[in-house]
Image (cartoon, grey):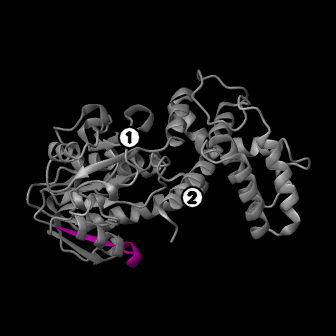
């Protein structure tokens, strides 16, 4: 296992290169006579890592960045590329500090040269097909603000487990750790990057969760003292939030590996009213309940800031495949809801096929269900149809969606 400092650096390098891959490629192409396409993928990754250190990290000397990159290229590709790697990165290192190439992108006035979506996709290192969808839906300026959010390091947000927000703020203040309230009162923001170093971590006084996910739990507004089935529960953040007002939360997940992580989190920060099972949400092993939370697998386009690698895997085909899986999970869940019970369907996606269109199709198939948003929820986060929707560029939290669906008595 890497030492803590090396692990943090490795994460910074990986996330940074993913966020800035296309500007880095534009920079490197200036010094590759045969073009960027002539470089093998393993070697290109090494060059990106080196260029990122040279242009965007202050704490690594240029000679160290070049030397380690050459050594890595030799290890990954072979001795024959060491001279090439050294030559390219030394040219990058010689650029003046005010050279605009490969600096982090910043919001513009909203005007672009050439087709807006293609320009934005290149500048902000996002899939062009996805950016085109966002431009059509949100407009150029809002899309660029969203892309800027995605390329920003996310803040660490804590959610209290056993106490209140005020209790958690007081605990942090006692130890001289400044904190600020998260948007909509959904958590506490701290500057610390390692939660395990914070007071109260070992005793389970908090868990880490973006405000958007905490808001989805709040939006569910399940009856007090209900038995809740959390169908896709790992890693357990929503389970912990749901357990505050539940008599019992049955937390299921189909992955044995993920269930192990879920169990660890609940043992540290749980209230003792959670029960973990290995179960497929397509065949939930429960009798009809009055509270069912379905945090469905999704494309995850609302959480790119926290998972910059996800943008490299999203495709339109994956979107269609996931939408079909969500449809099946919703239909299965419908049979597990008691009369008068609540089904909360949630995603961390911004795509209509996974969100409002999915819910509309479900209601067409199941007319005994209807939308019923909670009354005491922030109105600016509720759509005209009655669903919760958070947008990073508007709300300052991850993107998330939730629908509160109540079955007729």
Is residue 335 among what the camera can see? no
Does the magenta segment cover residue 238?
A: no
User: Which residue is found at the position 53% from the left and 36% from the top?
Assistant: 148
- Above or below, 182 against 209 in this view is above
Residue carrying label 2: 10
Residue carrying label 1: 397
In terms of depth relative to the viewer, which is nearer, 356 or 73?
73
Q: Which of the marked residues, 2 or 1, is nearer the chain's N terminus?
A: 2
Q: Which range of residues does the magenta coloring cover?
A: 249-258
Q: Is 84 placed left or right of 205 in the picture?
A: right
How packed is label 1: few (under 14 Cα within 10 Å), some, or many (20 or more)?
many
Does the magenta segment cover residue 253?
A: yes
Quarter that holds the C terminus: bottom left
User: Which residue is found at the position 79% from the left and 48% from the top?
Assistant: 89
User: Which residue is found at the position 71% from the left and 59% from the top?
Assistant: 68
In terms of depth relative to the viewer, which is nearer, 64 or 91?
64
Label 2 – label 1 distance at C-alpha? 25 Å
Q: Is 41 placed left or right of 272 in the picture?
A: right
User: Which residue is found at the position 25% from the left and 32% from the top?
Assistant: 379
Is residue 317 among what the camera can see? yes
How packed is label 2: few (under 14 Cα within 10 Å), some, or many (20 or more)?
few
Give percent across and percent down for residue 155.
Answer: 40, 44
Give percent across and percent down for residue 149.
Answer: 49, 38
The image quarter in which residue 41 lies? bottom right
Q: Please give the label number shown on residue 95.
A: none
């Amino acid at each position: 296992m890497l030492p803590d400092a090396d692990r943090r650096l490795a994460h910074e390098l990986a996330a940074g290169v993913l966020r800035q891959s296309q500007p880095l490629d534009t920079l490197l192409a200036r010094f590759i006579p045969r073009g960027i396409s002539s470089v093998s993928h393993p070697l290109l990754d090494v060059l990106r890592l080196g260029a990122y250190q040279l242009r965007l990290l202050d704490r690594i000397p240029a000679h160290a960045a070049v030397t380690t990159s050459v050594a890595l290229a030799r290890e990954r590709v072979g001795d024959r590329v060491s001279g090439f790697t050294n030559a390219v990165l030394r040219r990058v290192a010689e650029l003046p500090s005010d050279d605009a190439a490969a600096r982090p992108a910043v919001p513009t006035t909203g005007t672009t040269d050439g087709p807006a979506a293609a320009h934005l996709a290149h500048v902000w290192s996002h899939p062009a097909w996805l950016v085109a969808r966002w431009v059509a839906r949100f407009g150029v300026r809002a899309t660029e603000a969203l892309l800027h959010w995605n390329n920003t390091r996310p803040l660490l947000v804590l959610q209290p487990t056993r106490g209140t927000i005020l209790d958690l703020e007081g605990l942090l203040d006692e130890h001289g750790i400044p904190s600020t309230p998260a948007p909509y009162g959904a958590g506490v923001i701290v500057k610390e990057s390692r939660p395990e170093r914070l007071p109260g971590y070992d005793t389970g006084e908090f868990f880490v969760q973006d405000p958007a996910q905490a808001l989805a739990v709040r939006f569910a507004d399940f009856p007090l003292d209900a038995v809740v089935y959390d169908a896709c529960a790992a890693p357990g953040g929503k389970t912990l939030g749901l357990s505050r007002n539940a008599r019992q939360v049955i937390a299921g997940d189909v992955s044995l590996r993920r269930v192990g992580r879920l169990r660890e989190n609940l043992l540290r920060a749980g209230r003792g009213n959670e029960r973990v099972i290995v179960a497929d949400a397509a065949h939930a092993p429960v009798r009809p309940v009055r509270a069912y939370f379905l945090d469905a697998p999704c494309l995850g386009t609302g959480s790119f800031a926290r998972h910059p690698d996800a943008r490299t895997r999203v495709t339109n085909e994956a979107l269609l495949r996931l939408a079909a899986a969500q449809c099946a999970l919703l239909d299965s869940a419908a049979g597990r809801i008691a009369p008068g019970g609540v089904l909360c369907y949630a995603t961390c996606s911004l795509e209509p096929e996974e969100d409002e269109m999915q819910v509309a199709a479900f209601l067409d198939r199941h007319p005994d269900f209807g939308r019923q948003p909670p009354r005491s929820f922030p109105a600016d986060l509720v759509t005209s149809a009655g669903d919760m929707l958070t947008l990073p560029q508007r709300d300052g939290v991850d993107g998330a969606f939730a629908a509160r669906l109540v079955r007729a008595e």
